[in-house]
């Protein structure tokens, strides 16, 4: 970092990358066998784990843990995340924290301002849920001996009307909409999910630890300030828009509505307290802020694949500013218009994103399953070792997923070299 007396210090793009990756946990010493202590450390770095139903490779919330901890027990019933989310002492709970995400349970009172907003707005998605249905669902869930899915609840109270496909093709009954609304406003909590990924709802007092429910609820601006503080720790260095995006917060302060919390007020408070330092980052047009505990390592020795929903890359403008890496997920793009593929993961090597691969876990082959590389692309300036390093990482990923082999399709400029490297690296990687 450089600075001139009386002026704001400046970080090079490389320094900003290293700060960001250190804040996200890529500098933490790996444990030989990841334990719940490893999980806690990693969650403290990321803050949230985005939940997504796409399972072409591995569900999104499992991948950031793998990227930082390496292969770990990800069994959906007994693994580390399952225990943290569904066993006592419960460490995480699902809520709309970034988008749908696992968050530490102690964030529950900090989300009360969001729950209140959804109550006033009549929910996030469903504006037409009837009061009579809300009351029926409240009573029915409370009467159940344990958590309940929408389908199970429908057996008790009926479907509550025809299913709707008005929102992105979702096929939701009135009962399902009502459960989701009550979850958004905090009257219900997500206890877990079934093997088919169906949400299981229950009363918050039967899901969350008592000490969490007993925590005082901060006023909205104090809650937003704490969320910005956590976002700043997880980012290391960030602009105001990055800090707002992490927990999907309102960015601007409105003098006409001072009761509304904002990221701008939170940043001002944290700068005054010395927790954030205004800095400039090479190539960034906007003001940046460095967290006072941020580390600037001399190097980052990462070698891993990143989920499309990893906090390192989920804010695409930030990804471009840090890594000069233009990234768009193409799941919803028609096949003929996709540039890189359906489910493309960036490959992080050292402090750089040097390649991207379109991956699929094919468990229906009958011979132990295959990790299929549908396409592989090198980034400009990727080092000569990229194919060999990526092949080794693919074998590590395949082993974690329980897949016996890897195939590489001839699509992408890196595919020929990767196909040649995969057979030679497989025997050397555990």
Image (spheres, rainbow, N blue to C red):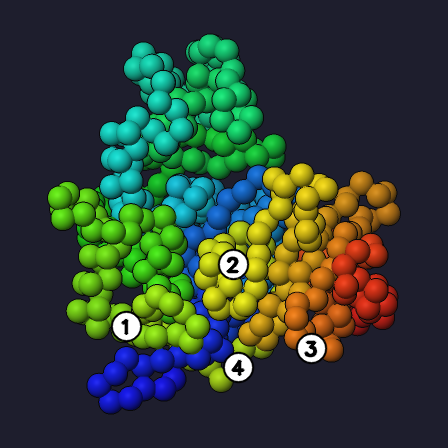
Q: Which residue is mark 3?
A: 383
**Location of residue 21 in the rendering, given as x and y in whole percent from the top left corner:** 48, 70
Task: Of the two numbered discs 2 and 3 on the same chain, state the one appearing first in sequence.
Answer: 2
Asked if disc 2 and disc 1 are in contact, CB closer than 8 Å, the reply is no
Task: Of the two numbered discs 4 and 2 on the same chain, state the one appearing first in sequence.
Answer: 4
Secondary structure beneath label 1? strand
Q: Residue at x 47, y 76 (%)?
A: 13
From this viewpoint, is residue 261 visible? Answer: yes
**Location of residue 273 in the rendering, given as x and y in whole percent from the top left corner:** 18, 69
Q: Which residue is mark 4?
A: 299
Residue closer to the observer: 391 or 189: 391
Task: Of the two numbered discs 2 and 1 on the same chain, state the one appearing first in sequence.
Answer: 1
From this viewpoint, is residue 36 visible? Answer: no
Q: Which residue is mark 1?
A: 278
Residue closer to the observer: 376 or 160: 376
**Location of residue 372 in the rendering, given as x and y in whole percent from the top left corner:** 78, 52
Task: Of the two numbered discs 3 and 1 on the same chain, state the one appearing first in sequence.
Answer: 1
Residue closer to the observer: 62 or 168: 168
């Amino acid at each position: 970092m450089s600075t001139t007396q009386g002026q704001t210090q400046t970080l090079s793009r490389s320094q900003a990358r290293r700060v960001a990756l250190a804040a996200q946990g890529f500098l933490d010493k790996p444990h030989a066998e990841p334990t719940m202590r490893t999980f806690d450390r990693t969650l403290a770095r990321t803050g949230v784990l985005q939940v997504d139903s796409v399972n072409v490779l591995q569900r999104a919330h499992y991948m950031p843990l793998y990227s930082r901890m390496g292969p770990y027990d990800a069994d959906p019933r007994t693994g580390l995340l399952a225990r943290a989310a569904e066993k006592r002492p419960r460490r995480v709970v699902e809520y709309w924290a970034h988008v749908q995400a696992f968050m530490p349970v102690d964030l529950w009172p900090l989300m009360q301002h969001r729950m209140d907003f959804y109550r006033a707005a009549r929910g996030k998605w469903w504006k037409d849920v009837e009061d009579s249905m809300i009351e029926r669902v409240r009573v029915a869930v409370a009467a159940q001996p344990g958590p309940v899915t929408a389908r199970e609840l429908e057996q008790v109270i009926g479907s509550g009307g025809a299913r709707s496909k008005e929102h992105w093709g979702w096929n939701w009954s009135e009962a399902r909409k009502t459960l989701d609304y009550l979850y958004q406003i905090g009257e219900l909590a997500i206890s877990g999910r079934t093997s088919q990924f169906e949400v299981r709802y229950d009363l918050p007092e039967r899901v969350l630890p008592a000490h969490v429910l007993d925590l005082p609820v901060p006023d909205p601006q104090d809650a937003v300030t704490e969320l910005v503080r956590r976002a700043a720790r997880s980012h290391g260095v960030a602009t105001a828009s990055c800090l707002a995006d992490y927990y999907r917060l309102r960015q601007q302060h409105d003098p006409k509505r001072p009761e509304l919390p904002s990221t701008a007020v939170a940043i001002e408070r944290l700068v005054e307290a010395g927790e954030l330092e205004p800095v400039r980052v090479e190539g960034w047009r906007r003001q940046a802020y460095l967290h006072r505990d941020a580390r600037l390592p001399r190097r980052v020795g990462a070698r891993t694949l990143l989920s499309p929903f990893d906090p390192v890359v989920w804010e695409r403008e930030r990804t471009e500013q840090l890594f000069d890496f233009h990234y768009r997920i193409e799941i919803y793009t028609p096949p003929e218009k996709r540039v890189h593929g359906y489910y493309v993961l960036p490959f992080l090597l050292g402090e750089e994103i040097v390649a991207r691969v379109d991956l699929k876990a094919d468990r229906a082959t009958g011979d132990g399953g295959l990790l299929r590389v549908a396409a592989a692309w090198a980034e400009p300036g990727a080092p000569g070792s990229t194919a060999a390093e990526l092949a080794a990482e693919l074998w590590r990923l395949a082993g974690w997923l329980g897949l016996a082999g890897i195939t590489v399709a001839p699509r992408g400029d890196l595919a020929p070299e990767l196909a040649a490297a995969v057979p030679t690296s497989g025997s050397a990687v555990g």
